[in-house]
Amino acid sequence: MRTLNTRFKRLLRLREFEFFQVELHDSEKCAYLLFCDQRFSEKGNKVDIYLISDFELSDESYQDVCSFNDDMLEMKHNCSYFMNVVSVKEEFEFDFPFDMLAIRTYVQEILDLVGIEKQLPEFEETDFDYLSQE
């Protein structure tokens, strides 16, 4: 089993989407992961994963992300997944814990950017106090 040097913090959890902050051990910057569960669409039992960053990850950090994805999804029988890399112009920043709704706004922007025609539900700042925002 591979030991990960990278930390993953879940920022948003909805029925179809999960969004993680990826704190890399070899960079001051953070990347982000968006898991999109396609089971609820016509695309079948599939998860699309988007690695979002404004820089290129080192090989070791990239392998950490791939290992995390495998750990999350390898026990899902009959589920396929694929990771896409999404390059953005600026790093996403939010004021934890005072501006948590910025996460919802950013995830909606990413969904629009990658062509996923879903609208996230509305919720309040206090919804981030719970394990799930739904």
Image (cartoon, rainbow, N blue to C red):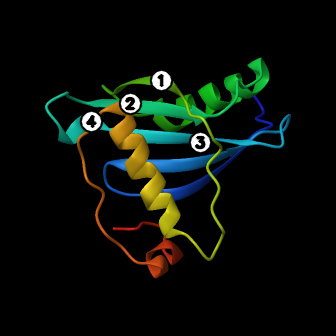
User: Is residue 40 rendered to the left or right of residue 33?
Assistant: left
Q: Earlier in the sequence, mark 4 or mark 1?
A: 4
Q: What element carries label 4?
A: helix
Q: In this view, does 91 lie above or below 106?
A: above
Q: How far apart are marks 4 and 1 (CA)?
A: 14 Å
Which residue is disc 1 drawn over? Answer: 84
Dot 4: within a 10 Å radius of its alpha carbon, few (fewer than 14), some, or many (20 or more) residues? Answer: some
**Closer to viewer: mark 4 or mark 3:** 3
Q: Which residue is drawn at 56% across and 35% down?
A: 52
Q: Distance between the residues labelled 2 and 3?
A: 14 Å
Which residue is disc 3 drawn over? Answer: 32
Which residue is disc 2 drawn over? Answer: 48
* Three-letter code for the amino acid on which mark 2 is drawn: Asp
- List x then y, in percent, for residue 45: 25, 30
- List x then y, in percent, for residue 116: 28, 37
Q: Distance between the residues labelled 2 and 1?
A: 8 Å
Which numbered disc covers residue 47?
none
Q: How far apart are marks 3 and 1 (CA)?
A: 12 Å
Evaluate if marks 2 and 1 touch, with contact meaning CB atoms under 8 Å apart: yes
